[in-house]
Amino acid sequence: MSQTRLADRQETVPDGGPLPSRLIGIGVALMVLMPMAMWLANRSSTLVLGLAVIPFVAAAIASGGAGAFAGRIGRLVATPLGLALAAFLAWALISTLWSHRPLASLRAWGELTLPVVFALAITASGRFRPQPAWLRALALAIILACLLAMVELASGLSQRAALGVGKLMGFVFNRPAITALVLAVPTIHGLWNLPGTRRSDRILAIVLALAVAVLALRSESASARLGVAVCAVCWGLSALWPRLTLTAAGCAFLLAMMVAPVLGIAAQNWLPSLILNRFAVMTGQARIDIWQSFGEVARARPIVGAGFGTSATMQDHPVAAEVAPAHRPLLAASHPHDMPLQAWAETGAVGAGILIVVGLLLLARLRHLPAREMAPRLALFAGTFAIAVVGHGAWQGWWVAVLGGAILWFGPGKALPQGEDHG
């Protein structure tokens, strides 16, 4: 059996009695509540995932001991994908040494690393194995979060105004809309393919898909709308032509990572104004201007970058002096609004190269799944990467925690038998 098949096989531990079972129930409840938590506080997913770690790990240790739990973590990290991800985190930490604000960079590194560690620990616990009832509960939680967000948007956020909480601006629902999409993909897949699936489960999956799509259209998040479109198209294509779609997704990923330092120039020169004019100000020309500014940073520090986490205050970094005066003001945009470009600007070719390896290893793992299992996972990869290419800061903890949660809700895919291949 190959390393990929070994990595896809989930380890389990004995239940160990009523106490671990109660702990698992608490952990599951927290995982189910993530979309609602994000509706209430749109950066709360890291906290939710961190709280969920506690009961899952406690249940694992109570049943099998700390040594067995540590051994499972070691085996997960020792996979090629685990080693590549660890290499990036290590390089990102090293790059804080040449940051102009090392403490701020360390905080950014911690914001990225914590949800990664939380998701790894839950996986290693062997206690989170999505069940039909859990998937139904998560679907209802996502639908409720979508409905509440749409009600607030329709009412002009009058509920929050009456309570005097939060920012009274529509963009606060951008993160909940993205969260709903990301968590909906494994939920829809799970409900549609449950053993002995019921008609009601598939109806629930359809309602969930509609709720997520409507919230994306109703929200101010162009990234969420793009993510919905890419997910739907990629899911359909990969179900019909899995190998071809996987290859196309890999080529698109590789191209986006490689051209990031010149993305602004390419978009300015080649993107028709007819397309640009269809977007809002911050998703049109201004976004391209930001890409041009940070692209100059990436080209000024091509090998090692400006240091992890420096995008937030790049206008104060010494590298700003090497950026054309006309492009310096937009270095204050907090981040490049493009994950590949942020990787290049902060960690250079070294960091971007490691992330390319991470992405390709992940896609290679999907290759060994049957089309029905591969299609939703590839759709999630393509949709979330599309969001990252045009969206928020690459290392934001809420985003990494939501991705980790979605991966956990998928559970392990069933690998193809030796020698069998689809597509």
Image (cartoon, rainbow, N blue to C red):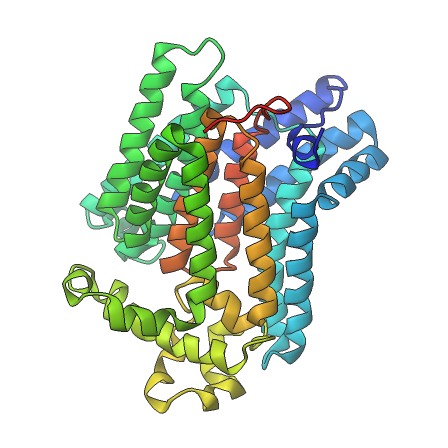
Q: Whole-percent x and y of residue 75?
A: 76, 39
Q: Residue at x 61, y 75 (%)?
A: 304
In the picture, measured across the screen, residue 204 lies left or right of residue 345, that is: left
Nearest the camera: 235 or 307? 235
Q: Is residue 205 above or below residue 267?
A: above
Quadrant in which residue 327 is drawn: bottom left
Q: State the image coordinates of residue 256 (x, y, percent, origin top left).
A: 42, 59
Q: Can residue 41 be seen?
A: no
Left or right of 40, for residue 271:
left
Does the image show residue 389?
Answer: yes
Image label count: 0
Query: Which residue sits furthest front?
Result: 419
Name the residue nearer the viewer: 56 or 264. Answer: 264
Q: Which image quarter is the C terminus in?
A: top left
The quarter of the picture where residue 143 lies is top left
| Quarter in which the N terminus is drawn | top right
Where 75 sits versus 115, above or below?
Answer: above
Q: Is residue 142 above or below residue 320?
A: above
Residue at image coords 31%, 18%: 203
